[in-house]
């Protein structure tokens, strides 16, 4: 498990917490186990399916009318719409299984609203 994850956590430090289980169509089936705060990310080529396998997490998503946050626990599933910025926050730890369209755009810094990066 990666403890104390932040948006700035180097990729080398994240290696043991994330694993690709298999390719699936234009996506990949992944598993992740971490605590802390993940970076904003989005998938421009399709919807992402996320299942909480163990633990609990707050799922943050930027919708057209602003941010939304949802508390998720083991057994719950969320479908992240194509192109929507989202992130996960879990102080105590979570295990997630995802079907993630490729490629994924991850930010490597903290920002309140990643949609501001899309504006010229």
Image (cartoon, rainbow, N blue to C red):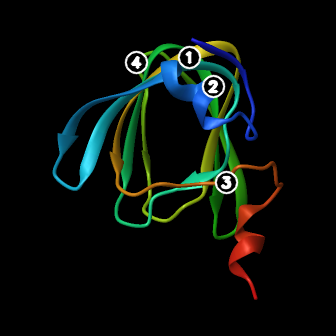
**Residue 23 in the image: above or below residue 91:** below
User: Which quarter of the image is occupied by the C terminus?
Assistant: bottom right
Q: Which is nearer the N-term, disc 4 or disc 3?
A: 4
Dots 3, 1 in contact, CB < 8 A: no
Using a 10 Å C-alpha cutoff, classify the residue at mark 4 as few (fewer than 14 neighbours), some (14 to 19) or many (20 or more). few
In the rendered image, residue 29, in percent from the top left (x then y), is placed at: 28, 35
Q: CA distance from mark 2 to mark 1?
A: 17 Å
Quick one: 48 or 34, which is closer to the camera? 34
The residue that disc 3 covers is: 107
The residue that disc 4 covers is: 75
Residue appearing at x 67%, y 54% in the figure: 107
Foreground disc of the pair 2, 4? 2
- Could you tell me which secondary element the residue under label 4 belongs to? loop
Q: CA distance from mark 4 to mark 1?
A: 12 Å
- Could you tell me which secondary element the residue under label 2 belongs to? helix
Q: Residue furthest left?
A: 25
Q: Is residue 62 left or right of residue 99?
A: right
In the rendered image, residue 78, in percent from the top left (x then y), is placed at: 44, 39
Q: Which mark is residue 13?
A: 2
């Amino acid at each position: 498990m990666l403890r104390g994850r932040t948006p700035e956590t180097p990729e080398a430090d994240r290696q043991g917490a994330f694993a690709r289980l298999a390719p699936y169509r234009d996506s990949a089936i992944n598993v992740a186990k971490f605590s802390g705060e993940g970076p904003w990310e989005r998938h421009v080529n399709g919807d992402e399916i996320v299942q909480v396998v163990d633990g609990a997490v707050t799922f943050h998503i930027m919708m057209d009318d602003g941010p939304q946050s949802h508390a998720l626990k083991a057994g719950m599933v969320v479908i992240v719409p194509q192109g929507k910025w989202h992130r996960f926050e879990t102080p105590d730890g979570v295990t997630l299984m995802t079907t993630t369209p490729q490629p994924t755009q991850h930010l490597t810094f903290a920002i309140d609203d990643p949609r501001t990066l899309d504006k010229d």
